[in-house]
Image (cartoon, rainbow, N blue to C red):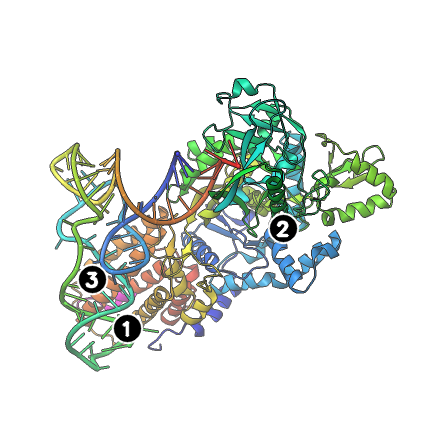
Amino acid sequence: MDSRYEHSQFETTIYKKWQEANAFAAPEASSADGKKPFCIIMPPPNANDPLHVGHAMFVSIEDMLIRYHRMLGEASLWVPGTDHAGIETQYVFEKKLSKEGKSRFQFDRETLYQSIWDYVHENSSVALDQMKQLGASADWERYKFTLDPDVVDQVLTTFEKMASDNLIYRGERLVNYCVKCGTAYSELEVKYVERDDALYYVTYPLEGDGEPLMVATVRPETIFADVAVAIHPTHPRAAELKDRQVRNPLTGALLPIITDEAVDPEFGTGALKITPAHDPTDYEIGQRHNLPFIQAIGFDGRLLETTSPDYVGLKVMPAREKSVAELKEKGLLDHIDSAYHHNVSTCYRCGSVIEPLPMAQFFIRVKPLTKPVLAALDRQETTVHGAGHDKILKHWLTNLHDWNISRQIVWGIRMPIWYEATKTNLTIKFITKQQEVVTGLIDELLQRYSIEEIEAGLQSLSAPKEADYVVSRTKPGENYLQETDTFDTWFSSSQWPVVSLKTNKPGDFDYYYPTAVMETAYDILMFWVMRMMMMGVYLTGKMPFKDVYLHGLVRDEKGQKMSKSKGNVVNPLTLVEKYGADALRMALVMSTTAGHDSAVGEMKVKGMRNFTNKVWNAARFVQMKQAESVTTDQVHDEEFTTYLNRTITLITQQLNDFKIGLAAETAHNEFWHWYCDIAIEQCKKGEISTTVLFEGLKTWLRLLHPFMPFVTEAIWQEVVTDNSLLIHQSWPSANGNG
RNA sequence: GGACUCAUAGCUCAGUUGGUUAGAGCGCUUCUUUUACACAGAAGAGGUCAGAGGUUCGAAUCCUCUUGAGUCCACCA
């Protein structure tokens, strides 16, 4: 053995050895021989992305758990997969297009989908290869992609079931719409940022005699869509203003004055302009008072014909400036509060300001799904490990709004929804879609109808009726056109534990479901874990996993969040090349706690590389000592065994309790500061026999293997000469060292 | 406004159901190239565990309050 462990000489060949021995394959149900199943469904990384350090974190923890349970003799299955990541991927692809001077507008639906498909599959092996470099012992034979035909088939089946259970409805709502990404988002995908904006105090002249009413707004460009002005019932002028009207300061239209509890009498002027089409609060007030609905801003973020000829086609900000100038000119702008501090909703993806816009979308009724999950959590069918996130989860489940599952993108699973397109019923929802998304539909319509007929159909559009559609995976009839929206990616990934097992080897679902552990970062608890619980219980009656282990976010050495703009992003593969996969894995896992962020820098990885070298050299010492065959008085042999057994018990207990960081720390400290610093030194003095030290080494290799699979296997190959593999060895037990 | 989390050595963090002199890594000081390892070893400096009060025979750990930091959610134009 060399005096240093050179990871680059071992890692590739060892991984190949494991694969040749078929060591990662989990038994199929028929051959499991009554073994206890232990299954982890991998959180599928985006198929088109290389791995970042967060992925390295989940690989380290999940591979550690899988190897541990495999050594315990359980039927251990780690199901790998990758995710099509709808919006994320389409966004990345569009950026790529724009670099090439192209835009998605130039492609029809099929071509765009095919181009993204090709793009994703060009890159899809990168992430998988990198996981292998990290030592991931997933069952690659069971790999699944979220757009595999059998997966899509399952997702469609789920949707049909939900539709027939009356859990799906189509509703015209104010949705969070990003005009840049061209799609609506769910409530979870909106990010609020603090900002200073101007607050305009606008005069609304009272019809007839009396003082005008003053209204404060940050969005004067939406005055065109005002349908009322509201005051609180206790407003000092409430009696005077009852049943009166004001003039819209831009259009001159008459607007009723209404009273509503939702108006804060303390804020601004105590009067609120009501714009139901562009503000969630106003939308609700509008519903309560049966107010009309005027849309002033279109899905391209430009002002519509409903405003004024001078404004049509203007983007929001120029329209705002223009409206302010016009108000000033008319003497209807009282004053401006130029530094009004408030929150603005932005797109989590591209950072653009979210426009609340009215649009027909498909929703899932969530109450029937969340209730059984809360009950299951109460009876501890699933335990959530991670710094209070269990409480947050329950809070969310209690307050969740209906889930908008339609997205106006092509990269994903197209909704199996059909509209009858006849001359009398051209009421799909063209007006609510961006043009390029519906190009395909328009083309198809053109084959059937004249432009005039289609335009007439669009013009006569009223609010779409509910149930004005058919759910079917195949075309229900000659005159039907398919919905252009795709499912929210989270709709399909929420079924992943069920679907990835059902579409896998025969019997996998029955044997491995419910799975043992869901391990992921806490930042997708609501997006993914919560919804997997909802869909898992809905589809199977059982929670999809027994334990949820949430790891924290990995920050840089200084505790700063990693971001491309800061330039402090750590590339895990660079560290693997420099210090070895074992060093990185140990650095990520050691002394971390569930749910808490951790700071990982090169120095910590380097320190752990030193540890791999320490293990290597301890083995080297034992090997040299064996060759000497010296006699000893062995006074400390019994003490050694007792202490080692205590350590085995401790580490085992810590792993069973999901104290993963602590287990790694215990292993590290006890190996270094007890086995090396004390036991080996005693052996040098002849106080411990070589045999005992050697047996202890083999035990230690097994204890360390889940954390540092490569170096431990490399040593096993050096010191154990029976051609066995460490990955196949059983976990040590305190009674007789296994 | 609500919720969650945190505050421990110069830095990054552990501290397992409250139990002797509070630990690790990195950094620092001194010594050692001794035949496993200098990617090392030995010895050492460094903490009134944010502050105040309470429970207890006993508190870094449990409770209350204060201060400070972070995260998530809600959102009033």
Label 2 SS: loop
| For residue A582, above or below residue A594 | below
Residue at the spot 71% in from the left edge and 57% down from the top edge: A114
The alpha-carbon separation of the residues under discs 1 and 2 comes to: 64 Å
Residue A201 lies left or right of residue A1; in this view the side is: right
The residue marked by circle 3 belongs to what chain? Answer: A
Residue A487 painted magenta: no
Q: Which residue is mark 2?
A: A180
**Neighbour tally class for label 2: few under 14, some 14-19, many 20 plus, Cα within 10 Å:** some
Q: Nearer the viewer, residue A704 or A22?
A: A704
Q: Nearer the viewer, residue A192 or A220?
A: A220
Q: Is residue A473 visible?
A: no
Q: Which mark is residue A613?
A: none
Q: Which mark is residue A621?
A: 1
The residue marked by circle 2 belongs to what chain? Answer: A
Query: If you read the primary sequence from the N terminus, does the residue marked by circle 3 or circle 1 appear first?
Result: 1
Q: Type of residue at label 2?
A: Lys
Q: Which residue is mark 3?
A: A637
